Image (cartoon, rainbow, N blue to C red):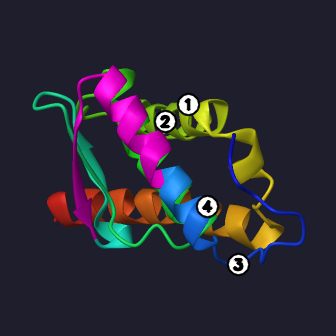
């Protein structure tokens, strides 16, 4: 069970919580035969064909933890690259849902509305980047 003391700061995780979050991600990766690599927070990605996931190096906030779970989810759910935007958006949404379903409940309790807003912004940024790349390709 997560070492999440009552009254812990909501913005960042304690060192014990960070260790627990990392261990949980590593256990899921081991169970699903996924190689974890560390990267900057917004450079996270997953490659299903090589079974590698790039997850946040820092693991300072609950968002970093959920991003790691999200990338593992892409591989477990066998997501590949698709041409159709609606398929890509469905894959993004299902990877976030997988992350929430497999997150430790005690770590999920650390999330504030602001944390969930960051996750929503990640989805919006993905959609924006896709729209920009598609408009550039048609020129």
Q: Which sits earlier in the primary sequence, circle 1 or circle 4?
A: 4
Relative depth, front residue between 7 and 136: 7
> What residue lies at 59% left-to-right and 63% top-to-bottom?
16
Q: CA distance from mark 2 to mark 1?
A: 5 Å
Q: Which mark is residue 11?
A: 3
- Where residue 112 sits, quadrant-wise, is bottom right
Q: Nearer the viewer, mark 3 or mark 4?
A: 4
Residues at circles 1 and 4 in contact by the CB criterion of under 8 Å: no
Q: Which residue is mark 4?
A: 17
Q: Which residue is mark 1?
A: 98
108 vs 46, left or right, is right
Q: Is residue 124 above or below residue 14?
A: above
Q: Residue 118: where, in percent of width, then height? A: 62, 69
Which quarter of the figure is the N terminus placed in?
top right
- Where residue 43 sits, quadrant-wise, is bottom left
Relative depth, front residue between 36 and 79: 36
Q: Is residue 65 above or below residue 24?
A: below
Q: Say which element carries label 1.
A: helix
> What residue lies at 68% left-to-right and 47% top-to-bottom?
2
Q: CA distance from mark 1 to mark 4?
A: 21 Å
Looking at the image, the residue that sits furthest to the left is 50
Q: Nearer the viewer, mark 4 or mark 2?
A: 4
> What residue lies at 45% left-to-right and 57% top-to-bottom?
127
Q: Which sits earlier in the primary sequence, circle 3 or circle 1?
A: 3
Q: Which residue is mark 2?
A: 95
Q: What stretch of residues is rendered in magenta?
A: 22-39
Q: Say which element carries label 4.
A: helix
Report whether residue 70 is seen.
no
Q: Which mark is residue 37?
A: none
Looking at the image, the residue that sits furthest to the right is 7
Residues at circles 2 and 1 in contact by the CB criterion of under 8 Å: yes
Q: Which sits earlier in the primary sequence, circle 4 or circle 2?
A: 4
């Amino acid at each position: 069970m997560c070492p999440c003391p009552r009254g812990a700061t909501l913005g960042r995780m304690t060192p014990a919580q960070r260790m627990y979050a990392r261990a949980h991600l590593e256990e899921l990766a081991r169970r699903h035969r996924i190689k974890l690599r560390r990267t900057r927070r917004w450079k996270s990605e997953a490659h299903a064909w090589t079974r590698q996931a790039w997850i946040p190096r820092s693991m300072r906030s609950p968002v970093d933890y959920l991003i790691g779970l999200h990338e593992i989810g892409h591989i477990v759910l066998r997501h590949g690259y698709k041409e159709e935007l609606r398929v890509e958006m469905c894959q993004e949404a299902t990877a976030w849902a997988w992350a929430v379903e497999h997150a430790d409940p005690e770590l999920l309790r650390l999330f504030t509305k602001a944390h969930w807003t960051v996750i929503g912004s990640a989805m919006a940024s993905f959609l924006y980047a896709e729209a920009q790349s598609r408009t550039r390709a048609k020129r």
